[in-house]
Amino acid sequence: MEIIKEDVPYQLHQLLDIIGNDKFLEICKMYGGTNVYIPMYKNIIIGGRNRELIRDYNGKNIDMLRARCGISRGHMRKILHEAGVIKL
């Protein structure tokens, strides 16, 4: 089915531009009429960032890794501890 931008509420035009007509229609079919929560970008990428930190940790480079991500030493240690890499 062919839709044009004017068929879509104005506040959804940017979403339509990003995902295209076909995907927009799929979302309408699946979620139409409901409220959908879209998490913040930074909250979605944290898991990948943490896996990278854990993978790159060599036992001696905690300060280099934490500086790369802009997190505190304590937060870096918490990430490593929760992954079972270090003990607090």
Image (spheres, rainbow, N blue to C red):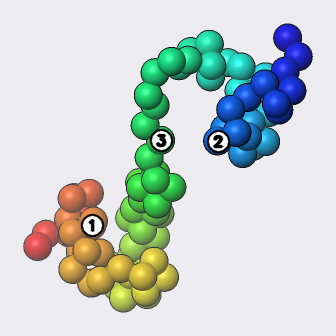
To which quarter of the image does residue 50 belong?
Answer: bottom left
Which tag is nearer the camera, tag 3 or tag 1?
3
Q: As drawn, is 25 to the left or to the right of 43? A: right
Q: Position of residue 46 (x, y in %)?
A: 42, 59
Q: Secondary structure at mark 1?
A: helix
Residue 26 seen in the figure:
yes
Q: As drawn, is 57 to the left or to the right of 5? A: left
Amino acid type of the residue tagged 2 in the rendering: Gln
Amino acid type of the residue tagged 3 in the rendering: Ile
Query: Around disc 3, counting alpha carbons within 10 Å, would you say few (fewer than 14), some (14 to 19), or many (20 or more)?
Result: few
* Residue marked by disc 1: 80
User: Label 2 vs label 1: CA separation?
Assistant: 41 Å
Callouts 2 and 1 close, C-beta under 8 Å: no
- Which residue is at a point 21% across and 69% down the rendered structure image? 78
- Which residue is at a point 26% across and 57% down the rendered structure image? 83
User: Label 2 vs label 3: CA separation?
Assistant: 15 Å
* Residue marked by disc 3: 38
User: Compared with residue 2, is residue 76 higher up or lower down, i.e. above or below?
Assistant: below
- Which residue is at a point 79% across and 42% down the rendered structure image? 17
Amino acid type of the residue tagged 1 in the rendering: Leu
Q: Position of residue 29 (x, y in %)?
A: 62, 13
Which tag is nearer the camera, tag 2 or tag 3?
2
**Residue toward you, 29 or 41:** 29
* Residue marked by disc 2: 11
To which quarter of the image does residue 66 belong?
Answer: bottom left
Callouts 3 and 1 close, C-beta under 8 Å: no
User: Label 3 vs label 1: CA separation?
Assistant: 28 Å
Residue sitting at the far left = 88
Q: Quadrant of the C terminus?
A: bottom left
Q: Position of residue 63 (x, y in %)?
A: 36, 88
